[in-house]
Image (cartoon, rainbow, N blue to C red):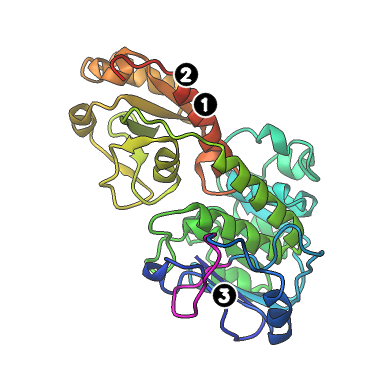
Amino acid sequence: MSTLHNQPVSSTPTPNTSHRTGRALVALSAATLLFLAGCSAGPAGSEGSGQTATQSPKPTASNSPSDATTQTAYPIDVDTCGTTTTFTKAPERVVTAKSSTMEMMLALGVGDKIVGTSYLDGPLAPWLAAEPGATSQAVTTPLSEKLAGQESLLELEPDLVYVGWESNLSADGMGERASYEKLGVNTLVSPSACKGSDYQPNPLTYEDVFSEIQLMGRVFDAQDQANSIVENERQELAKITKDTRGLSALWYSSGSKIPFVGGAKGSAQLTMDTIGLTNIGADIDDTWGQMSWEKVIEADPDVIVLVDSAWGSTEKKIGVLESNPATAQLTAVKNKNYLVVPFPATEAGVRTVSAATDLSAQLAELEIAGR
């Protein structure tokens, strides 16, 4: 995932993550570490307790939401996907790509630092509409429907380019990270989107999501807000009741000839596990991947989760399923056992928990014969 540190002092990693060596590290200065040690202990038995230096570290918060106001001690170095970026202060002019990064900033209360957006995946979450910067031109009028060109992006004089996919910062995207660094522009990739084996969550967990929120809280000097978000999302997550009917599901993201579906490593798998669905795409060793219609038909899922997007609406997907004689005979299609999730909520971030809450409620309303 990511590395964040002030000084090269070992941090206390989250347990049960030894298979993620090199993914994330938070190291604080010695003085800060000593201070936080006295106020960071979580409740007995919590996932953040019992940390040891021999396990793979993660950017977990050192303060709980009840602690005194916490400020970031700059400079800090942050490693996302293998590239280290140094922040001497909180970013002031940020260009984002993908909805997940824009919404992360809005949720942290720093949306007024956004000077440009691009490649948004859908409408803004209603609960973010009143946050600072949500109605700014930078947010409501993206630079581009797809990725903004590097030249137009640099005209905004950003001090940070913050993206939701690792491929967004490449020669085929908005330009390589090294080219921005040479110009004095910092870059960050959402840690959950890293593809390298040492950085990609395998699989994604809620602790990964929460760690990312807290990491960005440190970057933007909004640690208290980040901790508050995490605490609220933990409480919301605890209220979700898992369906016990033993239902299988297809997470249908896009594609007509060959569907692009949720695999074993990403938010699709995490969400289905949370609400009690068995993912028929679980043998795809990635966050997302292709699955032939023949395999879908063979699996015959009880439920189909439809990802709603501008380029692949719910109506379009239902049309694909119901117009094909073979897929029209699927159990889920015949009984219209559909759940719907907006595309922005499928990217790991501040909407991951709320997506599970929403889908759980939809699933509870489905009446499935014999289940």
Local crowd at mark 1 within 10 Å, few (<14), some, or many (≥20)?
some
Q: Residue at x 51, y 52 (%)?
A: 206
Residue 344 can be seen in this image: no
Residue underneath mark 1: 361
For label 3, the SS is strand
In the rendered structure, which segment of residues is drawn in magenta? 46-59
- Among the 4 quarters of the image, the one containing residue 203: bottom left
Residue underneath mark 3: 84
- Three-letter amino acid code of the residue under disc 2: Glu
Q: Position of residue 120 (x, y in %)?
A: 59, 41
Q: Indicate yes or no whether the magenta region holds residue 223.
A: no
For label 2, the SS is helix
For label 1, the SS is helix
The residue lying toward the viewer, choosing from 294 and 137, is 294
Q: Residue at x 28, y 34 (%)?
A: 258
**Marks 1 and 2: in contact by CB < 8 Å?**
yes
Q: Position of residue 147 (x, y in %)?
A: 56, 48
Q: Position of residue 71 (x, y in %)?
A: 79, 69
- Three-letter amino acid code of the residue under disc 3: Thr
Q: Residue at x 77, y 63 (%)?
A: 67
Local crowd at mark 2 within 10 Å, few (<14), some, or many (≥20)?
few
**How far is the residue under mark 3 from the one under mark 1?**
41 Å
Residue underneath mark 2: 365
Main SS of the magenta part reads: loop
